[in-house]
Amino acid sequence: MPVDHPILEIRDLSVRFGRAKIPAVNGVSLTVGAERVGIVGESGSGKSTLGRAVMRLLPPAARIEAAAMDFEGAPLLTRSEKAMRGLRGNRMALIMQDPRYSLNPVLTVGKQVAEAATLHQKISRKQATALAADMLGRVRIADVERTMALYPHQISGGMGQRVMIAMMLLSKPRLVIADEPTSALDVSVRGDVLRLLDELVRENASALLLISHDIRMVASFCERVLVMYQGRVVETLTRLEEAKHPYTRGLIAAMPDPKHPVSRLPVLDRRAINEAGAAP
Amino acid sequence: MIDVENLSVSFGQGTARTQVVKSVSFSVRKGETLGIVGESGCGKSTVLRSLAGLDRHWEGSIRLGGEPVDPDRRREQLLLAQMVFQDPYGSIHPRHRIQRVLAEPIRAMDKGPGWDRVGPALRQVGLPETFADRFPHQLSGGQRQRVAIARALMLEPEILLLDEPTSALDVSVQAEVLNLLCDLRDERNLTYVLVSHDLSVIAHMCDRVLVMQRGTFVDELTKDDLQRGITHHAYSQMLFEEAVNGLRTVNEVAPVLN
């Protein structure tokens, strides 16, 4: 799919861990513009490894090989760790599954958001605090004054993800990688968090890579969906109904649907999937 | 099979005391599967823990199989209901082999050593008998949840209490575990109480669904209601929409910030 002004361009990316023969990510190519792209697959399909490879956050044991991995037109793989650190949290951002682990447990919410402001902008601490309060208000945290004085363990999961998004609003990243941003959250707040993410990327014309195992949620939210199986992209979809690969169809069929009850849920036919291989 | 009347559970002391479950009543027939759905903190797991005898400070009355049970369970009352927990990584002893995990309930109830029952128990949940020598970390999440189900069935209870049994699993593995639970229910005429935040799982498994919010049941739905999309409360309506449509609404209303 041709994309004008790609934000992220990956050609033939492979990731291997240690001396393992089987690559965790195997020959993945992907071009992302200012759009929302979903990556789905079950555990171990390599979807999170792909996200982390882009952020260069994989452990040293991982070997990343790619014909090209360009972010805003410049190669990512040859960059120094110092240069990467300038990018992360600034030009590219990662939202992880559980905000309880991605926020610093010994800093109050207000301090953390203000820290994000002082790291990437030259402003005083007082200005940073005011800016932080402003951002927390924009992610619709009701009682900003009170929330800023709370520690991460005192806030709910949904509020934690909002704090993460508030930190991103400050730096206006071009690329947001959201790795299961809603799977630790309740159904009622999932919609809110996704809506905020959507506003964030639309407003800054950034790219969003949404990584999740929930194919239905991803399909309803993203313009394109990549389905990964055993490290490969087996299919790229714009609508669930177009699914042809037996793996994608199996995933969709395995989800119970209240409107169309069945006595037994269909399970994945792994042999058929492996025979179909990585169809384009 | 299960009769609960005016069950209340509170946590904390003095001014910090909060009532988590507010005088709920329900009953489950033999062979029926009851679902309880609601968001975190609504009290659904607390209801289940009271039924299982894990929480001992509840008030009201609980009858299992016609027998009233005490908050502090006697041994034979504990045999009536067994529980399967959400996280198979946390609910199985990491340094015990699977055979010891499975024999433990038999030994705890002084019913013999229990080793001879390990093989059949594994087969019944669709695992090879050779798994008996393995440690939990050598099993996948779905296999571990099968072990947890096998362990709950060791004492042949008539009631199985399921607390989010598949929410730590992949969709594909979830389907396998849900099928297994359905098969076991049909084979043994088990009574299930299934707690989940995922209405689509509940709708698939249950004959009847109670929707819980802030410690009380706000809605009761039958399988028929769910198929036809009938709900009687705004909250269950929202849960239902989300289960059926995914997040279609997200794309429609995306107001720009500022």
Image (cartoon, rainbow, N blue to C red):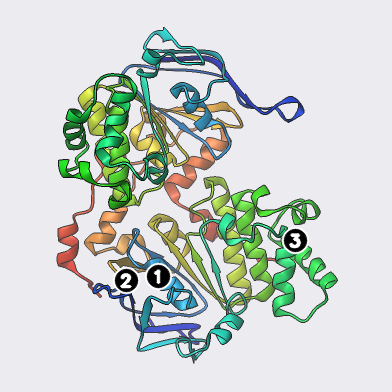
Chain ID for label 1? A
Q: A201 left or right of A251?
A: right
Q: Quadrant of residue B13?
A: top right
Which one is nearer the viewer's eye here, B129 or A140? B129
Q: Which amino acid type is marked by label 1?
A: Thr
User: In the picture, which quadrant includes the C terminus of chain A?
Assistant: bottom left
Please tell me whether mark 2 sits on a helix, a strand or a loop.
loop
User: How far separated are the C-alphas under marks 3 and 1?
Assistant: 31 Å
Which one is nearer the viewer's eye here, B255 or B92? B92
For image coordinates 47% across by 59% down, the residue present is A180
Please tell me whether mark 3 sits on a helix, a strand or a loop.
helix
User: How far separated are the C-alphas under marks 2 and 3?
Assistant: 38 Å
Please tell me whether mark 1 sits on a helix, a strand or a loop.
helix
**Circle 3 sits on which residue?**
A110
Question: Which residue in the rendered view is the most extreme toward the right?
Answer: A126
Can residue B150 be seen here? The reply is no
For image coordinates 18% across by 65% down, the residue present is A274
- Residue A36 x, y percent position in the rendering: 49, 70
Q: B70 left or right of A246?
A: right
Q: Which mark is residue A184?
A: none
Question: Which residue in the rendered view is the most extreme toward the top?
Answer: B67
Label 3 near label 2: C-beta < 8 Å? no
- Residue B198 x, y percent position in the rendering: 44, 42
Q: Earlier in the sequence, mark 3 or mark 1?
A: 1
Name above or below for residue A182 compared with residue A27.
Answer: above
**Circle 1 sits on which residue?**
A49
User: In the picture, which quadrant includes the N terminus of chain A?
Assistant: bottom left
- Residue B8 x, y percent position in the rendering: 59, 20
Label 2 near label 1: C-beta < 8 Å? yes
Q: Quadrant of residue A200?
A: bottom right
**Circle 2 sits on which residue?**
A24
